[in-house]
Image: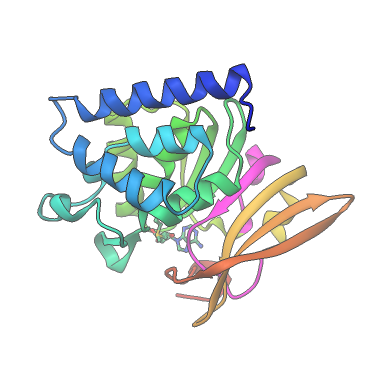
Amino acid sequence: MVLFSFMEVFSLYALTFIILLSIYDEQDPYAQKRFEMVEKQIISRGIQNARVIQAMLKVPRHKFVSEGLRDSSYEDRPVPIESGQTVSQPYIVALMTELLAPAPGKKILEVGTGSGYQSAVLAETGCDLYTIEIIEPIALRARQILQNLGYDNIKFNIGDGFSGWEEHAPFDAIIVTAAPGNIPEKLIEQLNPGGRMVIPVGDVNQELKLIEKINGGTDIRNVTSVRFVPMTGESGGS
Ligand code: SAM
């Protein structure tokens, strides 16, 4: 017989309550699509972290894409934004967030702000987020959207994230959403002992890697094959 602890039962009730609230939110015409996205793309593929599920249910993904793409923004695929960049597929956003084990007060560095959607999901889990984007118009657009949505736990930087963000290091976790050819050494240096980094690595064939800094070294695990835009700047791209 499976026994649940009080906290597990409480979390399940809280999650059900949030799901019901999100479905019946008449102010939000995309609430139903968002619920279906979470049910069919996120929970059914094995994402279990309640904070991640709650964040994916809450963050209005349609607000991070252009007007003409809003109706398709909850589909099971990346969505194009400006300058040939993309908002990652919902499942990949959820998977990368879960791998970071986010929690309130955790200090997280994000390299590649993009649309700001992944940033919002991380901020929604209560962590303190530091995000860097190399393309200025994209960075400014994301900052505006995130500020309009009221996220005040995000610090923004326009620049090359290949070398991290020395001024605010070390971080409890680092997420990289563009693919370098190799793992940037500077980012490992800026991880706290016990910290985790999630990063796609490779050119044509990319692997999503989970790196844990333990016992003075690193434990590196391949999670799944992925397809991200290449990391530019010092990493080697233009
Ligand atoms: N997670 C983002 C979202 O939810 O919209 C998607 C990010 S998109 C796949 C990758 C982003 O990384 C692009 O906006 C790109 O400009 C940015 N990027 C690429 N190389 C970078 C670098 N060296 N430093 C910072 N950002 C970089």
Coordinates of residue 163 in the picture (x, y in percent): 63, 57
Looking at the rendering, the quadrant in which ligand 1 lies is: bottom left
Image coordinates of residue 185 in percent, x first then y, are 72, 62
Q: Is residue 192 above or below residue 185?
A: above
Q: Quadrant of residue 62?
A: top left
Magenta region: 163-183
Q: Position of residue 92 (x, y in %)?
A: 44, 56
**Residue drawn at x 26%, y 46% as measured from the top left:** 64
Does residue 116 appear anywhere in the picture?
no
Residue farthest to the right, as pictured: 215
Residue at the location (60% across, 17% down)?
6
Q: Quadrant of the N terminus?
A: top right
Residue positioned 43% across, 20% down in the render: 14
Decide which of 194, 83 is in the foreground and name it.
194
Residue found at the very far front of the displayed protein? 1
Image quadrant in which you'd find residue 45: bottom left
Relative horizontal placement of residue 31, taking residue 236 as reference (left or right): left
Q: Residue furthest left?
A: 68
Decide if residue 183 is in sight here.
Answer: yes
Compared with 139, 160 (above or below) is below
Q: Does 166 lie within the magenta span?
A: yes
Residue toward you, 5 or 172: 5
